[in-house]
Amino acid sequence: MKESGENYLETLLILNERLDSKVRAVDLAKELSFSKPSVSRALGILKNNGFINTDDNGYIHLTESGLSKAEKIYERHKILTGLFKHLAGVSEEIAEKDACRVEHVISNETFYGLKAYLENNCGKNE
């Protein structure tokens, strides 16, 4: 999956929590600062790949595979943000931006190694 698709899934996960599972395309467009046509195109791709579905009211829901992928990306985001803030001492804003970039390209081996290190040496994973 490309970075943009991962960003959509992660954002859907966050918005589902914030909006009590009542997320529409317009909410995604606003949150991501994208045009409605761009969001509609991306949602079509995610739907065709089995990551989302929509109900009769136009609300977007993550499928089981979409939720699994979104949770993995969001976990990476949270752990990397914490690593950058607490161990590297960078600001919240920079930590968030950098984590958003790195979460899509870091290998599983490196990510799980960092996660294990944090759990073993810091007693936390954020």
Image: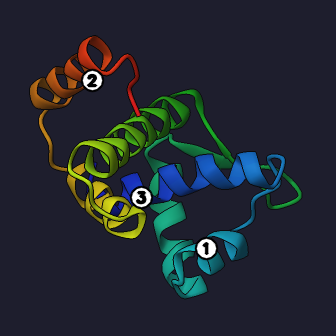
- Farthest right residue? 57
* Label 2 residue SS: helix
Q: Residue at x 61, y 73 (%)?
A: 31
Q: Is residue 13 above or below residue 71?
A: below
| Marks 2 and 3, how far apart at CA | 24 Å
Q: Position of residue 80 (x, y in %)?
A: 30, 43
Please tell me the numbered disc located at residue 7: 3
Q: Position of residue 21 (x, y in %)?
A: 79, 47
Amino acid bearing label 3: Asn
Q: Position of residue 118 (x, y in %)?
A: 27, 23
* Label 1 residue SS: helix
Amino acid bearing label 1: Glu
Q: Is residue 57 above or below residue 41?
A: above
Residue 117: in sight, yes or no?
yes
* Label 3 residue SS: helix
Instruction: Check disc 2 and report the residue beneath it.
Output: 118
Q: Residue at x 14, y 42 (%)?
A: 106
Q: Residue at x 35, y 49 (%)?
A: 81
Near-viewer residue (94 or 25) = 94
- Farthest top residue? 120
Q: Earlier in the sequence, mark 3 or mark 1?
A: 3
Mark 1 crowdedness (10 Å alpha carbons): few <14, some 14-19, many ≥20: few
Which image quarter is the C terminus in? Answer: top left
Q: Earlier in the sequence, mark 2 or mark 3?
A: 3
Q: Is residue 104 above or below residue 69?
A: below
Q: Is residue 58 above or below residue 105?
A: below
Amino acid bearing label 2: Leu
Tag nearer the camera, 1 or 2: 2
Q: Residue at x 36, y 37 (%)?
A: 79
Q: Earlier in the sequence, mark 1 or mark 2?
A: 1
Residue 54: in sight, yes or no?
no
Instruction: Check disc 1 and report the residue beneath it.
Output: 31
